[in-house]
Image (cartoon, rainbow, N blue to C red):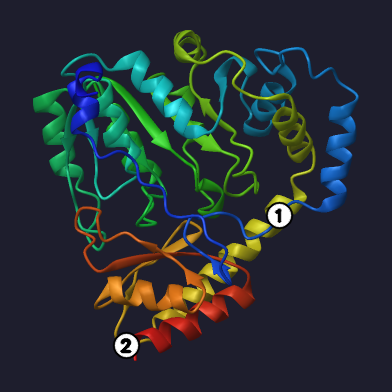
């Protein structure tokens, strides 16, 4: 079969999603621990049942675009919808990266940045930095001047480290960039910070957001891009048509109409995150890192063994030891208080 595939595909290992298992506490994929209420689901299904399912959805999902634009204080022509933010990352790279174009990334970070860049023929320019170290701004600016990358891929808060770029840092990178700046804000709701106000000043800035985390919609796949109207106009040409299904559009539009539940849940998860971090800091043999997201990265001795012991006790976390500079690191998503207690008890038992 090798003759049928291009070399970039054959050489890749591909993205490895963690196993989906029923556990006492599933804390491995940075999902919200809160499902949507049953009465909300029934109301949405009733609304969807009144619409024709044999017709394609509206290609531009105008109601949803308007709701997103109004939330962020933008115009609808600054919004592009997709079947999850990963699909939109593909759209951006397919529209911008040609053979040997430079793509600047900052590992350890989200693995699909490198995978998709390679698939589209990009020359990945990686500037690694340890999670305990500050963002390597001077090295980044020097590399940008020398290599002039076509696009810079940023993640803030960063997955899997939880580190947050300041708006000044984002602004500095935008000022120096000769190409596009893609900023993944999948976890922005948990940080209390967004670079959306910078869109007016930097037409080359693209911000990616998702409904998978704060809005509890990981199972329905909805993401969106925010950028200048001209940038969105060009990206729309490379985007898949009809990529948001009817049910997802109805659900997301109704969630945006009443964001109170989401905001309360985010506030509660931020408090849980800070509480869990303080509890983990009491455990002498591990080293948790501060986080601006809904997860905590921590170093622990013999991480693979600890991971297996946690799983044996029904606690599923993410082993991120395969990421650059993250040997013997695990990542735990913030769950409900009960789940966080279970995790702490199991972690202490696994370390003893």
Quarter where residue 300 is shown = bottom left
Vertical side of 262 occupied by 319: above or below: below
Q: What's the CA distance linking mark 2 and mark 1?
A: 34 Å
Picture disc at residue 284:
2
Q: Is residue 269 left or right of residue 170?
A: right
Q: Is residue 164 left or right of residue 124?
A: right
Labels 2, 1: front one: 1
Residue 282 in view of the camera: no
Q: Position of residue 136 (x, y in %)?
A: 19, 48
> Dot 1 surroundings within 10 Å: few (below 14), some, or many (20 or more)?
few
Vertical side of 52 occupied by 259: above or below: below
Vertical side of 252 occupied by 92: above or below: above
**Which of these two is toward me, 303 or 97?**
303
Residue 303 in view of the camera: yes
**Mark found first going from the N terminus, 2 or 1:** 1
Q: Residue at x 16, y 33 (%)?
A: 125
Residue at which label 1 appears: 35
């Amino acid at each position: 079969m090798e003759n049928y595939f291009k070399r970039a595909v054959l050489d890749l290992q591909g993205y490895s999603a963690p196993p989906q298992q029923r556990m006492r506490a599933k804390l491995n994929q940075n999902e919200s621990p809160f499902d949507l209420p049953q009465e909300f689901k029934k109301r949405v299904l009733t609304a969807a049942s009144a619409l024709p399912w044999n017709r394609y959805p509206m290609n531009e999902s105008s109601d949803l675009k308007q709701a997103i634009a109004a939330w962020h204080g933008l115009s609808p022509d600054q919004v592009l919808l997709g079947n999850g933010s990963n699909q939109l990352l593909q759209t951006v790279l397919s529209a911008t990266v040609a053979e040997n174009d430079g793509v600047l990334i900052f590992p350890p970070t989200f693995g699909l940045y490198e995978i998709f860049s390679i698939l589209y023929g990009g020359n990945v320019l990686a500037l690694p930095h340890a999670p305990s170290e500050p963002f390597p701004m001077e090295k980044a600016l020097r590399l940008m001047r020398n290599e002039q990358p076509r696009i810079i891929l940023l993640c803030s808060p960063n997955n899997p480290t939880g580190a947050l770029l300041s708006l000044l840092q984002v602004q500095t990178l935008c000022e120096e960039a000769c190409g596009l700046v893609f900023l993944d804000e999948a976890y922005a709701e948990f940080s209390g910070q967004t670079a959306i106000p910078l869109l007016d000043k930097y037409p080359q800035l693209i911000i990616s957001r998702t409904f998978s985390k704060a809005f509890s919609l990981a199972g329905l796949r909805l993401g969106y891009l925010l950028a200048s109207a001209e940038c969105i106009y060009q990206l729309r040409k490379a985007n898949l048509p009809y990529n948001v299904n009817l049910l997802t559009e109805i659900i997301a539009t109704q969630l945006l109409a009443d964001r109170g539940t989401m905001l309360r849940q985010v506030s509660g998860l931020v408090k849980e995150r800070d509480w869990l971090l303080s509890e983990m800091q009491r455990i002498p043999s591990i080293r948790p890192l501060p986080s601006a997201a809904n997860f905590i990265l921590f170093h622990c001795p013999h991480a693979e063994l600890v991971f297996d012991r946690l799983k044996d006790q029904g606690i599923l976390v993410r082993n991120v030891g395969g990421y650059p500079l993250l040997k013997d690191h695990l990542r735990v998503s913030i769950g409900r208080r009960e789940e966080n207690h279970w995790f702490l008890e199991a972690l202490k038992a696994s370390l003893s």
